[in-house]
Image (spheres, rainbow, N blue to C red):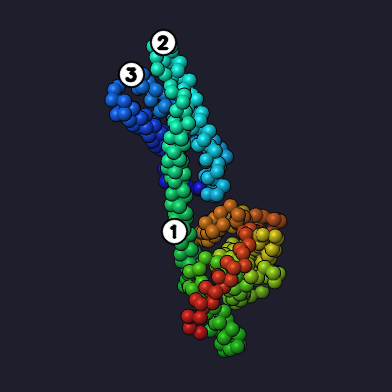
Amino acid sequence: MSSTAFSSPQRRRLYWLFQIVGWVLYGVLGLILVMVFSHSFQPFILLVELYVAVTLLGLSHAMRNYVKRYGWVNLSIGALLPRLLLAHTVVAVLSQIIIGLLSASSAQLLMGSSARSYDWTMLIGYAINVEFVMMLWSTLYFGQHYLERYRQAEIDKWKLTAAVREAEMQTLKAQINPHFLFNGLNNIRALIGEDPECARRMLSHLSELLRYAIQLNRTEQVPLSRELAVVRDYLQLESLQLEERLHYTLDVPEECLGVSVPPMLVQALVENAIKHGIAPRPAGGELRVQAWCTGPELRMTVENTGSLTAAADAPRPDGTGTGLRNARERLRLLFGSAAELTLTQTAPDIVAATVRLPILREESRMQNEEIMSRQLSGLPG
């Protein structure tokens, strides 16, 4: 997991605290039971119970190291149970051999051969007892790990919700800010007298863009075809402002159109490319959106005329750059290490934003499309 409820030093301290206290209590309980059933106290039994506690502490710790080394906490229950049963049996038998040898040696050394030492005839019974105790130990150990994983999943879920909401707010700030609306509406107003039909089309583009930004950011993923439709709306509106300075191409094969992507992901990359690559250049530039479906992955690139150095030196009073960080965080929370977003200088005057993410199964995609359809059906026309 990316983060845990406790820091590593604190986790180690808690682990050793529970280990020592737990096995000491187990030894004390064994001593009490022996005293109750034998109606007497023999100092040698205290030594035997000490061997029991120390031996089981050491063997359980060795088992824990083996479990961590081979990643048993990541196994399914079906794969984990037989491994644990075998490990418990090994610990149970080995512990009785060690305890028996230590007890016999101590008895011989301290009290002579006539002293009563370890009862080897009870080895199977003692081993079964340890087997059950190790089951309890494993239940606590793996239960703690599964509980921690569940809590981390809940944390990531809320992080994703917050990231989606933040993306919605950033999108609304990018689209519904006075500068953007002023330019868009002013250009549309100018078109009303010159080309009423074009003005109506541009107003429709603006309406669709705002509708999408407000409504669809409430879902985690949408079909790429829907995302590209909004990208076209955005590019049409930017073309009103940049005119001949903006040239763009969308090159996406049909087999990629049904792939699910986070909403506003491509639009954010296109907006970033125009703001920092094309708009600052007097001559403008070109923008190209491409996508490929390669096996289980979707790869997309947004290339634009520009320079990473120039973009880094440019002032950012409106918080730009947050969009890319937010996009990376959303990809991480949705797909983990299976997705990535990189920004590179592929040529002296070409910058490329590249996205790699896994293709969801068909049923997941259909569920997202159904959700999107229900949401859109509730919007006014």
Q: Is the Cβ of the residue at disc 1 closer than 8 Å to that at disc 3?
A: no
Answer with mark 1 or mark 3, whichever residue precedes in sequence: 3
Secondary element under disc 1, as helix, strand or loop, is: helix
Please rate how many residues cluster around mark 1, counting C-alpha atoms within 10 Å: few if below 14, some from 14 to 19, many from 20: few
Q: Mark 3 points at which residue?
A: 43
Q: Is the Cβ of the residue at disc 1 closer than 8 Å to that at disc 2?
A: no
Residue at the (44%, 28%) spot, across then down: 122
Secondary element under disc 3, as helix, strand or loop, is: helix
Q: Mark 1 points at which residue?
A: 158
Please rate how many residues cluster around mark 3, counting C-alpha atoms within 10 Å: few if below 14, some from 14 to 19, many from 20: few
Residue at the (46%, 24%) spot, across then down: 120
Answer with mark 1 or mark 2, whichever residue precedes in sequence: 2
Q: Which amino acid does label 1 sit on?
A: Trp
Q: Is residue 211 visible?
A: no
In depth, the one of 196 and 164 nearer the eye is 164
Of all residues, the one furthest to the front in this rendering is 121
Q: Mark 2 points at which residue?
A: 112
Answer with mark 3 or mark 2, whichever residue precedes in sequence: 3
Q: Which amino acid does label 3 sit on?
A: Pro
Q: Return the x and y of residue 350 as percentages of the image width and height.
A: 68, 59
